[in-house]
C-alpha cells in the first residue's frame, strides 16, 4: 500500500523540476514528508560510458528534456499513466506537473476507461470507494495541499470526507483548490468548509458538477458562497442528507428552496446567523421534506410565527428540534406550533433566548409533543412555575429536563415537577430564582425514577434544598453540585445517606466549605459503586480524604483533587492501595506535592491514561521529564 504524507503547499518550483539534471529525478522520496502523494523508492542510475563536453553543452543539458514538451503532450502522457502511484510520483516533480494533473478528471484517465469498458458501464474505478478522510486547518489549508490531496488519494481508496478550516490568509484555499478536489475526487461524500472567505460559488459549483455522491455539506463563515453554489448542489447532488449553514451572509431563501425541491433525502438541516434566510426558505424545507426530515436547528434567523406554524404542521418526522435567538417569533408562533399537533415524533426540544416562550405557549407545546423525552430551556425569562408544571403534566413521557438561566423558576416549581414522576435526569444551571427556603406545603411524593441531579452555580440552592432532595430523590446515582459554594457538611451528609442505589459519579468542585468529613462518609457509604469523584477547588480537603479513598474505593477510575490541601503523604496513600485502579488523576495547583511524589506517581501510573500536574510548583521540570519518559502511555499535562 503506498504511503500518504502531508504536503506543505509552498515548496514547489513553478514550472520547473526540483533537480538540475534528470539523474536527480529519481530522488523524489526526499520530499515525501511534504507531499500527500505516493513516492517510489529511489533508484541509482548507472553510467557505463564517459563523456566530455564543454561548459556551454553542460548548461544546455541541465534542463530535463521532458520539460520542453508542451502541456498538451504532458496531459496525454499523464492520462495514460497506469495507476494512482504513478500519478503521485509525477505530481512530486514540480508544481507545474501537479497543476496539470489536477486538471484531469478521474474518468479521463485511459486506465479508468479500460476498466469501465471491461467491467461494464455500471461499474466505476476500484479506487472510488471514498473511505479516506483529510482535514486541513490553518496555514496548512492551501490550494497546493488540496491539489496534492486530490492526486494522492485517488490511488488509495478515494477521498470520502474533506474538512477545511481556513485562516483567511493570503495563501488560503480558493476556488482553484476546491476545483482540483472536485475533478480528482468524485467519490467525495462529505465536505466541510469553515472560515474560507476566498471560496465562492465557482468552487462549490465544481464540487456539484463532479461529486454527485455528496451527502453532507457544512458551510461555516463562507461569506463569498451565495445561492448559486447551493442551487448547483441541489441540481447535481440528489443524495444530500445533511445541510449545515452558519454565518453565510450571501445565502438566502432561493438556495434553500432549490434544496427543498431537488434533495428528497434531506434528513438534517442546521441554519444559523444567515441574515438573508427568512420564512420562505425555512417553510420550503419543512414542507417539502416532511416525510424524512428528522433534525432541525434554526438559530439567529429573521423568521416569524409563520415558520413555526409550518414546523408544527409539517414536522411529522422531526425527532430533534432546536430553536435559538428567534427574536421575531411571538407567543402566538410557539402556541400554534404546539397546537398544530404535527410534532408527534418529537423526542428532543431545545429552546434558547426566545421571548415567545411563555407559560401559555409552553403548555401548548407540552400538549402537542406528547412523546417528548428531553426538554432544555435556556434564557427563557418569561417562563414561571405555572408554565413549567403545566408542561410537565401534559408531557407524560418526559425523562430529561434542563433549565438554564430561567430566573422565574423557583424551588416550588422544581419539586412540583419531581412529584409528577417519570423524570430521570434534572439539570439546573444559573437559576437565581431558586431560593433556599422551606416549603409550606407537604413534601411531594418521592421521585424514585430520578437517577441524575445536576445543580450548577445556583447560589440560592443550599442546605434546606439539599434536605428536601434527600427526602424526594432516594435513587440518585449521578450527583453534580459544582459551584454551590454555600453548601456545608450538614446539608450534604443527609443526601449522601439517603442515596439507596449507590452514587457512581459525584462532582463537588467549587464547594468551598466542604471538609474531609464529607469524603469519609462518601467513601464509606458508596465504596462499592463510586467511579468518578471531582473535588476541584475544595480547599479544605486534605490527605485524610485520600487515605479514605485508598482504603475504601474499589472501582474509582477518575479522581480530581486540584487546588486541594494535598501533600506527598496523600499521594503515598494512593500508591499503597493495591485494589485502586485509577485511570485519570488530577493534582493541578497542589503546591505541596513535590519531587518526593515522583516514585509514587510512577507506581500509580501503571494504570493511568491521564495525569494533570499543571502548576505544581514544587515539582521540578527535570522530574516531570523523567516521569514522562517512564509513563509514556499516559497523557501528562504539566
Image (cartoon, rainbow, N blue to C red):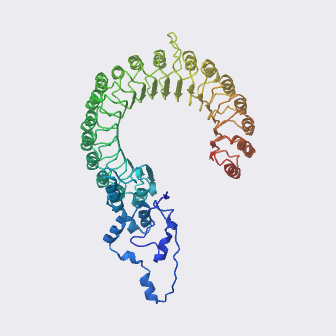
Picture quarter containing residue 607?
top right
Residue lying furthest top: 442
Query: Measured from the top left, where is residue 104 in percent x and y?
Result: 33, 62
Whether 577 is drawn above or below 188: the answer is above
Q: Residue at x 30, y 29 (%)?
A: 315
Whether 413 is drawn above or below 319: the answer is above
Whether 472 is drawn above or below 143: the answer is above
What is the number of callouts on the image? 0
Residue situated in front as seen by the camera: 534 or 618 = 534
Residue lying furthest front: 118
Query: Measured from the top left, where is residue 99 in percent x and y?
Result: 37, 65
Residue situated in front as seen by the camera: 408 or 106 = 106
Task: Indicate left or right for 520 with 508 as reference.
Answer: right
Task: Indicate left or right for 86 with 539 as reference.
Answer: left
Residue situated in front as seen by the camera: 343 or 428 = 343
Picture quarter containing residue 496?
top right
Residue 170 is at least partly visible in this image: no
Query: Measured from the top left, where is residue 569 in percent x and y?
Result: 75, 37
Whether 104 is drawn above or below 588: the answer is below
Task: Indicate left or right for 492 with 439 as reference.
Answer: right
Residue 580 is at least partly visible in this image: yes
Query: Measured from the top left, where is residue 328 in percent x and y?
Result: 29, 33
Amino acid at each position: 500500500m503506498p504511503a500518504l504524507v502531508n504536503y506543505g503547499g509552498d515548496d514547489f518550483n513553478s514550472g520547473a523540476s526540483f533537480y538540475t539534471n534528470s539523474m536527480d529525478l529519481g530522488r523524489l522520496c526526499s520530499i515525501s514528508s511534504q507531499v500527500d502523494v505516493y513516492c517510489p523508492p529511489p533508484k541509482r542510475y548507472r553510467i557505463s560510458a564517459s563523456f566530455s563536453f564543454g561548459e556551454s553543452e553542460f548548461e544546455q543539458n541541465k534542463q530535463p528534456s521532458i520539460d520542453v514538451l508542451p502541456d498538451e503532450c504532458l496531459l496525454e502522457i499523464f492520462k495514460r499513466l497506469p495507476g494512482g502511484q504513478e500519478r503521485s510520483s509525477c505530481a512530486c516533480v514540480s508544481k507545474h506537473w501537479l497543476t496539470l494533473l489536477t486538471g484531469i478528471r478521474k474518468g479521463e484517465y485511459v486506465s479508468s476507461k479500460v476498466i469501465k469498458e471491461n467491467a461494464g458501464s455500471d461499474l466505476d474505478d476500484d479506487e472510488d470507494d471514498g473511505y479516506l478522510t483529510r482535514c486541513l486547518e490553518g496555514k496548512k489549508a492551501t490550494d497546493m495541499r488540496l491539489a496534492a490531496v486530490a492526486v494522492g488519494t485517488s490511488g488509495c481508496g478515494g477521498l470520502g470526507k474533506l474538512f477545511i478550516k481556513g485562516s483567511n490568509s493570503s495563501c488560503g484555499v480558493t476556488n482553484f483548490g476546491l476545483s482540483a478536489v472536485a475533478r480528482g475526487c468524485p467519490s467525495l461524500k462529505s465536505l466541510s468548509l469553515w472560515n474560507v472567505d476566498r471560496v465562492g460559488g465557482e468552487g462549490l459549483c465544481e464540487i456539484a458538477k463532479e461529486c454527485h455522491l455528496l451527502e453532507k455539506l457544512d458551510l461555516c463563515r463562507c461569506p463569498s458562497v451565495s445561492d448559486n453554489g447551493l442551487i448547483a448542489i441541489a441540481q447535481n447532488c440528489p443524495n444530500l442528507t445533511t445541510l449545515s449553514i452558519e454565518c453565510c451572509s450571501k445565502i438566502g431563501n432561493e438556495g434553500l428552496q432549490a434544496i427543498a425541491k431537488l434533495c428528497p433525502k434531506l434528513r438534517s438541516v442546521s441554519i444559523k446567523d444567515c441574515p438573508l434566510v427568512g420564512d420562505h426558505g425555512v417553510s420550503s424545507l419543512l414542507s417539502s421534506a416532511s416525510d424524512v426530515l428528522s433534525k432541525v436547528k434554526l438559530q439567529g434567523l429573521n423568521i416569524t410565527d409563520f415558520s413555526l406554524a409550518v414546523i408544527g404542521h409539517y414536522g411529522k418526522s422531526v425527532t430533534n428540534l432546536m430553536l435559538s435567538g428567534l427574536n421575531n417569533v411571538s407567543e402566538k408562533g410557539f402556541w400554534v406550533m404546539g397546537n398544530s399537533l404535527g410534532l408527534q415524533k418529537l423526542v428532543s426540544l431545545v429552546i434558547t433566548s426566545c421571548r415567545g416562550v411563555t407559560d401559555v405557549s409552553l403548555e401548548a407545546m407540552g400538549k402537542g409533543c406528547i412523546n417528548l423525552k428531553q426538554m432544555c430551556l435556556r434564557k427563557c425569562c418569561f417562563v414561571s412555575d405555572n408554565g413549567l408544571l403545566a408542561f410537565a403534566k401534559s408531557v407524560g413521557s418526559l425523562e430529561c429536563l434542563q433549565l438554564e438561566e430561567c430566573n422565574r423558576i423557583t424551588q416550588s416549581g422544581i419539586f412540583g415537577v419531581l412529584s409528577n414522576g417519570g423524570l430521570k435526569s434534572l439539570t439546573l444551571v444559573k437559576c437565581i430564582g431558586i431560593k433556599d427556603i422551606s416549603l409550606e406545603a407537604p413534601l411531594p411524593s418521592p421521585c424514585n425514577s430520578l437517577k441524575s441531579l445536576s445543580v450548577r452555580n445556583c447560589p440560592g440552592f443550599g442546605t434546606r434544598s439539599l434536605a428536601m432532595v434527600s427526602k424526594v430523590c432516594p435513587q440518585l446515582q449521578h450527583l453534580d453540585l459544582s459551584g454551590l459554594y454555600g453548601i456545608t457538611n450538614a446539608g450534604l451528609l443527609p443526601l449522601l445517606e439517603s442515596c439507596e442505589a449507590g452514587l457512581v459519579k459525584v462532582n463537588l468542585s467549587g464547594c468551598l466549605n466542604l471538609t474531609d468529613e464529607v469524603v469519609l462518609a462518601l467513601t464509606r457509604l458508596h465504596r462499592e459503586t463510586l467511579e468518578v469523584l471531582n473535588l476541584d477547588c475544595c480547599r479544605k480537603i486534605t490527605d485524610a480524604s485520600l487515605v479514605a479513598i485508598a482504603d475504601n474505593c474499589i472501582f474509582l477510575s477518575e479522581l480530581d483533587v486540584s487546588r486541594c490541601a494535598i501533600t506527598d503523604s496523600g499521594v503515598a496513600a494512593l500508591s499503597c492501595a493495591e485494589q485502586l485502579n485509577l485511570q485519570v488523576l488530577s493534582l493541578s495547583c497542589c503546591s505541596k506535592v513535590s519531587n518526593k511524589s515522583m516514585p509514587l506517581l510512577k507506581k500509580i501510573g501503571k494504570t493511568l491514561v491521564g495525569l494533570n500536574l499543571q502548576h505544581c510548583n514544587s515539582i521540578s521540570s527535570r522530574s516531570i521529564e523523567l516521569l514522562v519518559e517512564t509513563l509514556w502511555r499516559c497523557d501528562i499535562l504539566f
